[in-house]
Image: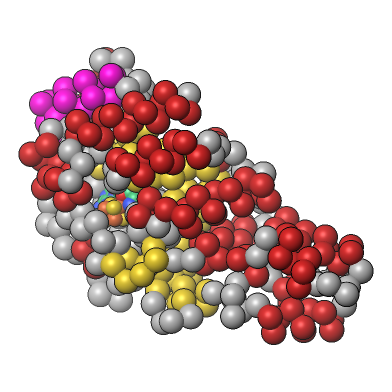
Amino acid sequence: MPSAYEYSKEELSELLAGEPRYRVDQVWHGLWEEAQEIAGITTIPKSLRARLSEQFAPGLQVVNDLESDRGATRKWVFRLNDGSTIETVLMSYEDRVTVCVSSQAGCAMGCTFCATGQAGFTRQLTAGEVLEQVMFAARAASPRRLSNVVFMGMGEPLANYNVTVNVVKRLHEYRGLSARHLTVSTVGVAPAIERLAKEGLPLTLAVSLHAANNETRNELVPLNRRYPLERLHEACEFWIETTSRRLSFEWALIDQVNDTDQALDELARYAYSLRAHVNLIPLNPTPGYLVRGSPPDRVRHFRDGLEAQGINVTVRNTRGRSIDAACGQLANVTNAKRRSIPVRSA
Ligand code: SAH
Ligand code: SF4
């Protein structure tokens, strides 16, 4: 049985043929605007709720619900219908509420410093499974409105291309989210970046760079051997020209690996030539990678150095470390096997 979020409005109308026309709007409003489950759409009769509940099967079941940062960060582990598990993180800030969704169960890209990459690939998610993560988070965020969706959970969204495009389109059409509120993060699948540029979707693209010389990047991001920095640069240029949008680079600062003055200069050159924004993330600890994140003074030095070279920089804070909810820590090994690490902001 499919998730209700697999359906377009037309398909839903067909399913509800025989019902008064306004029922379609009520169900649609309940699902998309109010982020309700069928059982929670109280504007429709109980009998219809019962019928629809038999037609649709929710794709996610909560198996773990964790919070940190005094409730401002929440992480859910969901079991999918085939038993595999994924994770979703909700982050509340003063000015926005952001959900970080998974696009795949696991990831095949094998980045060495990422817990998801260390655990390997299980399967692609369906559009319904990605959208249900968003809607679940929207319900949990209530009465605040979920304002941002970022594809920065488990998986490589551009390796699940059609689903990613489909989800972005629907979030735009049905939830009104636009480029400032929708971010897809990719490890740098160059041809897919170019294809995505041509879709004309309202989204922000973030590219996980982490190194701006091929030798280091080959080590950190194995995909770099297939699409080295020169090829990635072409794709980024194409993105900017085609969409007229800025892109941002993600850079997880790793002690003595990519936080040196040489790395700084390499990044500054690469980012400057593309007028890209840089997001620095002090590396979060993962079980399979024994190198540490850069110390706070190194993070500041790196930020100041980039700024001095004319680059726009943001230092991202490391929300959710104590529940393994921070960037790169999603791997369903939560807390059971590891001691908590105190949350701190850089
Ligand atoms: N696969 C996509 C999106 C998911 S990863 C991508 O790689 O872009 C989301 C972000 O977390 C990426 O920028 C990734 O490089 C970063 N990340 C992975 N492991 C990390 C870690 N241990 N510490 C900090 N950031 C990490
Ligand atoms: Fe996959 Fe992104 Fe992790 Fe690399 S950093 S292994 S692409 S989830």
Residue under the point 34% across and 62% down:
330
Name which quarter of the figure residue 2 lies in.
Answer: bottom right
Q: Out of 135 and 336, give the one closest to the viewer.
A: 135
User: Is the residue 271 above or below the residue 103 in the image?
Assistant: above
Judge whether residue 242 is colored magenta.
Answer: no
Residue under the point 26% across and 61% down:
108
User: Could you say where residue 78 lies in the image, as x and y percent from the top left?
Assistant: 46, 73
Quarter of the image with the N terminus is bottom right
Q: Out of 338 and 289, give the one closest to the viewer.
A: 289
Quarter of the image with the C terminus is top left
User: Which span of residues is magenta-colored?
Assistant: 254-273
The rendered magenta stretch, by its main secondary structure, is classed as helix
Mark count: 0
Residue under the point 35% across and 20% down:
275
User: Could you say where residue 213 lies in the image, as x and y percent from the top left?
Assistant: 13, 33
Q: Is residue 91 visible?
A: no
Q: Which residue lies furthest to the right in this view?
A: 20
Name which quarter of the figure residue 265 lies in.
Answer: top left
Residue 312 horizontal side relative to residue 211, left or right: right
* Rendering quadrant holding ligand 2: bottom left
Its colouring scheme is secondary structure
Residue 51 horizontal side relative to residue 194, left or right: right
Judge whether residue 271 is colored magenta.
Answer: yes
Q: Can residue 112 be seen in this view?
A: yes
Residue 44 horizontal side relative to residue 7, left or right: right
User: Could you say where residue 248 lies in the image, as x and y percent from the top left?
Assistant: 37, 32
Name which quarter of the figure residue 104 lies in.
Answer: bottom left
Q: Out of 313 and 340, give the one closest to the viewer.
A: 313
